[in-house]
Each structure stands twice: as C-alpha cells, then as structure tokens.
Image (cartoon, coloured by chain):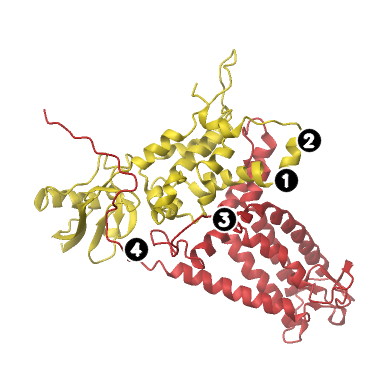
Chain colours: A yellow, B red
Amino acid sequence: MSDITMRVWRGDSTGGDFESYTIERNEGEVVLDVVHRIQATEAPDLACRWNCKAGKCGSCAVEVNGKPRLMCMTRMDTLPEGPVTLTPMKTFPIIRDLVTDVSFNYEQAAKVPALLPPPMPVDGYRMFQQDVERSQEFRKCIECFMCQDVCHVIRDHEENKQHYAGPRFFIRHAELEMHPLDTNDRREYVREEAGLGFCNITKCCTEVCPEHIKITDNAIIPLKERVVDAHYDPVAWLGRKIRRKTKTSATEAAVQPAP
Amino acid sequence: MTSVSETKVQLGGTRGGPDVATLRQDRWWIQPVVTVSILTAFIIYSTWAAFQGKNYYVGAQVHRDLISPFYSPCIASDCVAGAKSGFALNGWTLSPALLILIFPLGFRLTCYYYRRSYYRAFWWSPPACAVADAHSSYSGETRFPLIMQNIHRYFFYAGLVFNALLTYDAFRAFNQPGLGFGVTVGTIVLTVNAGLLWAYSLSCHACRHLCGGQVKSFKAHPIRYRFWKFLTPLNAKHMNFAWASLLFVAFTDVYVRLVASGAWTDFRLF
C-alpha cells in the first residue's frame, strides 16, 4: 500500500512546530493506530493520551485536519488524500505534543450545583420512565471535551473562560434542571454564572459530539427557553404572580448542599 | 517505583498548534456562501415586493381569489377591491406589506435555526466550526441588541395568527368567484405555502418548549408530554422547514404577482 504523511504538532508551552512522519499506510487503521506506529518506529517520545481505543473514554481527542476528532474513531481511509495534520485541542493549554491540560473543565464541573432532592418520602423516591428517558441522552457524554474545544466562545476568546461553562456543562445543567426530583432552580445560575447567554447556538458542539448528543437542540435551547420563562417573559412572570408560585431562590442554587 | 510529577494546572496558559485561523482542509466556506446568497436574495426580493403595492391580488375579473402572503391581511386603506380584510388602518396608504412583514421577519430573525445560520454566514462568529471568529471580542446574546433574541416566543405567537390568516386565504381561494368550488395551480400553491408555514412554526424550539418542554416532570403532565413527543421529531426537521417555507413563501408571492400582472395564467385543474 502507499505511504501516508502525518504532520504532527511537536512542542510544549515554550513553543513548537510541525514534524512530518512518512509511514506505510495499512488497511483498516484509525489515526490512533498510526500515531502508535510513529511512537514505535520514529518518535518514541511523542506524547498523546489514549485509553480504550473504542470511542468510550474520550481520552484521545485531538484536532485532525483542523477539526476535533477522537483519534481512535477516525479511520484513515475517511480522510482526504495528502498529509494528515494532527494538533492538540486548541482551546486548552498545551502540556506536550498532542496532550492538553483540560483542568478548565474539571473546575467548571466542580461548580455545578448538585442534585437537591426533596426529603425522602416514606415509600422512597420514584422516577418514571418518561422522565428518565428525557435526560438519558445527556448521560451518554464521555467527557472528551471536544464540544468545549470547538466552542468559539472560549476557543477564540480566552477571557470568556472566566464566566462561561461551555456545552459539556450545559448538558449537565439541563439534565439536572429537567430532573423531576431536583428542587434547585438553576435558571438564574445558568444565566448569571454559567454564561448561557454567551452561546449563540452555532451548533458546532453538536456537530463534533462523538456520542451524537443533540447538545444544542435538547439541552442549550431548552435551557435558554427556561431562562426566558424566568427572566424575559412578562406573561410568564404575571402567571407566576397570579398563581402565587414561588420558586426556590435561584441565586442561592449554587450553594445548596448536596444531600 | 517511578515517581510521577504532578502537572500544574495552567488556566490561560500557552496553547498548542500554529497561530492560524483554521487548519481545516475541507470546503467549509460553501455553507456560509450558500446561506448568504439565499438570504440576501430573499431580503432583496421581499423588500422590492413589499414596496410594489400592486399585483398582489388576483380577483373576480379572472374568477380567482388569490392574495400574496406578503400582503395578507390587506389592512391598508387603499387595498384593491376583494383583497381588503375586515379591518383597515385608516390613513395608512403605503404598502400593507411594510406592516405585515414585520412579524414573519421578526419570527425568522429571532429563530434559533436562522440565528445559527446568520451568525455564521453574515457575522462570521464563527464562519464555520473550528474556524476563527472574525471579531476580537465577543459578548454573545448577553447585551443589547442581541439580548432581544429572547422575545422569539412573542414572534412565534404572532406567526400563529398569520398562519391562521394564510390558511383562511388558501381555503377561500378554492371558492372561485363566478365558478364556485375549483382547484387551480394557485389554490395548491397557497395551500402548500400555508402548510409549510405551519410546519415551520410547529417545529419551532419555542413551540416545543411551551407545549411541554418546560415541565419538570412529564409523568405529572401527560397531555403536555404527548404534545412534546409529537413536536420533537418535527423539531428535528426545523432546518428543512425553515428553508422550504422561506423559499416557498417567496415563490407564492412570485406566482400571484405574475398571474395578477397577466404574465402567467392560473390553470384550473378541475
């Protein structure tokens, strides 16, 4: 079979450049297989994360030809002819070569207010199938953080990391906000603290999700509509006043303790 | 035992990769170009059509009752005979389309799908996924004027009223003056137009939310759950309905305009 040229970003926080490796193309290989062969033959010090090789751990996310992809799920024969470019995820600081520091995401995860169920009824908590199914999609997330990487709000505007949770955590917020046993009202939190208004729904997160989660349609837009209910819709506000419906203090949602 | 040093967390640290706008090799620019072309063409045509103030109605003189969707309801005081709605704005002598189009255009302008399209195609924020944003700073929809996108549901409500009126126009077109009930190409065009507009409205994200998506527990709201279940697959096709209804509403205006001007004949099928 013919050879393939891989242009791999080599470097760390002090700088870097592309290095080209030309190796034999084998049938049925994915990008991660080729990277492993480069490590085995030409560059044993090439750094990359990987674990399951089955698209379920999310470790091997890099940018293949400029787009976030899982190396283990990207077949070489699906890529166009010519050199294949591999770069680390652009949104996060580089550690070395293809490995980035994704700590930003763990900091955001720690901020998510925990599920706060009501006191346990005598017959225990019950959750019905139709409510389970609604948020089941969000549980498929493998935390590859490619949605975070491709989101231009933080990819192109580093300063927004201070006040923007990102798509991965909007699906977490949506899952909890739609949970029938959660008494926390998260609408104020996602507007003020998580920066939902920064999202301009360009759907890139949905496009790159390896689990095909409809992040924008099923999580972000429903969250935006819930924020409209709470903040921008005078009719909804009037309805709440008439029905004397009081919500949990939304601004305190972030400090509600986990059960 | 090998010791493993802990990597220090570096928020805002140096990023890897070259400092270029994108490394994508595919033709990512095709989608923005197509979007800009279609939307610009529609804006130019609808603006031209709105200022025409004529050839928007095919009336009894040719045994038809066809009105352009851009001019329905015809509420200006000088609307042509037959096209007038029951209500007229006395003193408004400009084209009624200038008033009417505010609502459907507002609905589309604040629509979640169109927002995605024009933020990408016109504002380049970003032009495509993993292609650099064209602006140095970004505040999204957190400030005026883009915070006004949150009134989308009110345009949705207004859109329902216009859908009902255009559906009424389509039904009325089947009763042809002097001939009675009949089906012409024009009646089919008006009916398809109304159907596509209903599909676009019902597949709207705000509609899905208001009908059932906003509830905390589906079990506690079984009827709203059924609505939500019905609307969810429609919502998945929202993009298709958005383009189809946009193009067809323009075609409907073109059709009525050409028949009204005598350039085309509205063929009667039966």
Report the side of A108 relative to B50 (left or right): left
Pointers 3 and 2 in contact (C-beta within 8 Å)? no
Distance from Cα at disc 2 to Cα at disc 4: 53 Å
Q: Is residue B126 above or below residue A140?
A: below
Residue at mark 3 shares a chain with residue at mark 2: no
Asked whether, in this view, residue A90 is left or right of residue B171, the answer is left
Query: Label 1 neighbourhood size at 10 Å, few (<14), some (14-19), many (20+)?
Result: few
Same chain letter for marks 1 and 2: yes
Per the image, the residue denoted by label 4 is: B22
Which one is nearer the viewer's eye here, B233 or B137? B137
Q: Are marks 2 and 4 in contact (CB under 8 Å)?
A: no
Residue on which the image places disc 2: A242
Q: Secondary structure at mark 1?
A: helix
Give the alpha-carbon distance from disc 4 to disc 3, as whole Å. 30 Å
**Residue A225, horizontal then vertical, whole percent:** 61, 46
Query: Which chain is disc 3 placed on?
Result: B
Q: Which residue is situated farthest in the top direction here? A: A122
Callout 1 touching callout 2 (CB < 8 Å): no
User: What amino acid type is highlighted by mark number 4?
Assistant: Thr
Three-letter amino acid code of the residue under disc 1? Pro
Q: CA distance from mark 1 to mark 2?
A: 12 Å
Pick the front one: A184 or A56: A184
| The image quarter in which residue A82 lies | bottom left
Residue A226 lies in quadrant:
top right
- Chain designation of label 4: B
Image depth: mark 1 or mark 4 in front? 1
Q: Which residue is mark 1?
A: A234
Q: Position of residue A244 (x, y in %)?
A: 75, 31
Q: CA distance from mark 3 to mark 1?
A: 30 Å
Residue A33 seen in render? yes
Label 3 in the same subunit as label 1: no
